[in-house]
Amino acid sequence: MKRLIEMSGVTKDFLQGDNVIRALKETNFIAYEGELIGIVGPSGSGKSTFLTILGGLQKPTTGRVLLNGKPFSELDIKEKSKIRLENIGFILQASNLIPFLTIKEQMVLYNKITKTKVNQPWMDELFQKLDVERLKNKYPNELSGGERQRSAIAKALYHEPSVIFADEPTASLDTNRAYEVVKLLAKETKEQKKATIMVTHDERMLEFCDKVYVIVDGVLSERIRDWLYKAKMLVRLLIPSMCVYGNMLRGIFAIITPGLLNRFM
């Protein structure tokens, strides 16, 4: 599999008075095409620092970031901005929508900046998938929190980036819509061979991730999930209809592990 984005020996220090605070300890990280990766950790653990360095919004103190196999963190601001525009999609907790543009105009702005043709079929497909078709001519202040977040996700996916950074993408969504959004991210990641890095506090969304990493006190480590958690993920992803097979599987597993399966199905 192709490496889409990676960190090598990255650290990040901040000055606090006369003291140097190491917010991110030495970190090595690789995201391959087709991977949806979850990042979890307590507040102040270094998740935002990790994500902003990976996305080229901050420079590392040591180490480097590669994007599509090419140096990224060493580039100047202008070069980084150009590469981000073409290769990275951001889904932020506060929704990165421009207040004086309608939702459709937000999408078309990318084409105006890059002097490319509007991809109307793909735009329409995104609007339908994210249920924002009726909102396309409205401004951000006319939308609810959930509507703004879904519109921001459509905007992030529109230019078909190779890497997506999602910071709490389900924060403003109800449970059903949250599952739909993460399923869509997982589907697009696989089908379009993207890499998606998702920071979340919602452990329920991690079942759709290929890998899960935990950051605690600036230290990144991969979480090893148990066999039953992985079995649940495979069942949900590979079996088209849980209605057909769910009861049969529930019965089989219940014989082996009475009462345990109900916590996961």
Image (tube, rainbow, N blue to C red):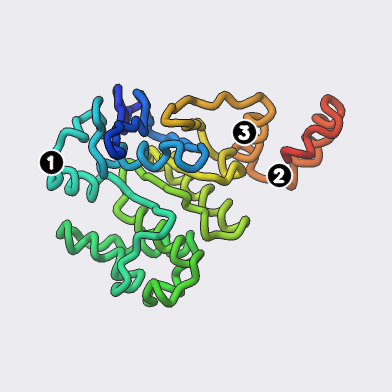
Q: Which image quadrant is residue 7 in? A: top left
Residue drawn at (45%, 31%), measured in percent from left and top?
Answer: 217
The tag on residue 239 is none
**Which one is earlier in the sequence, the residue at label 3 or at label 2?**
3
Nearer the observer, 228 or 120? 228
Q: Residue 101, percent across and down?
A: 30, 72
Can the viewer see residue 186 in this picture?
no
Graded by Cα atoms within 10 Å as few (under 14), some (14 to 19) or many (20 or more), the crowding at tag 2 reads: some
Question: What residue does disc 2 label?
Answer: 242
Q: Amino acid at mark 2?
A: Met
Count of numbered labels shown in the rendering: 3
- The vertical placement of 25 against 173, above or below, is above
Query: How far apart in space, not on screen, are marks 3 and 2 (Cα)?
Result: 12 Å
Q: Are marks 3 and 2 in contact (CB under 8 Å)?
A: no
Query: How far apart in space, not on screen, are marks 1 and 3 (Cα)?
Result: 43 Å
Question: What residue does disc 1 label?
Answer: 76
Q: Are marks 1 and 2 in contact (CB under 8 Å)?
A: no
- The vertical placement of 226 against 251, above or below, is above
Question: What residue does disc 3 label?
Answer: 234
Nearer the observer, 43 or 87? 43
Residue drawn at (45%, 61%), measured in percent from left and top?
Answer: 149
Q: Amino acid at mark 3?
A: Leu
**Which one is earlier in the sequence, the residue at label 1 or at label 3?**
1
- Name the secondary structure under disc 1: loop
Graded by Cα atoms within 10 Å as few (under 14), some (14 to 19) or many (20 or more), the crowding at tag 3 reads: few
- The vertical placement of 197 against 258, above or below, is below
Q: Residue 44, percent across and down?
A: 45, 41
- Name the secondary structure under disc 2: helix
- Circle nearer the viewer, 1 or 3: 1
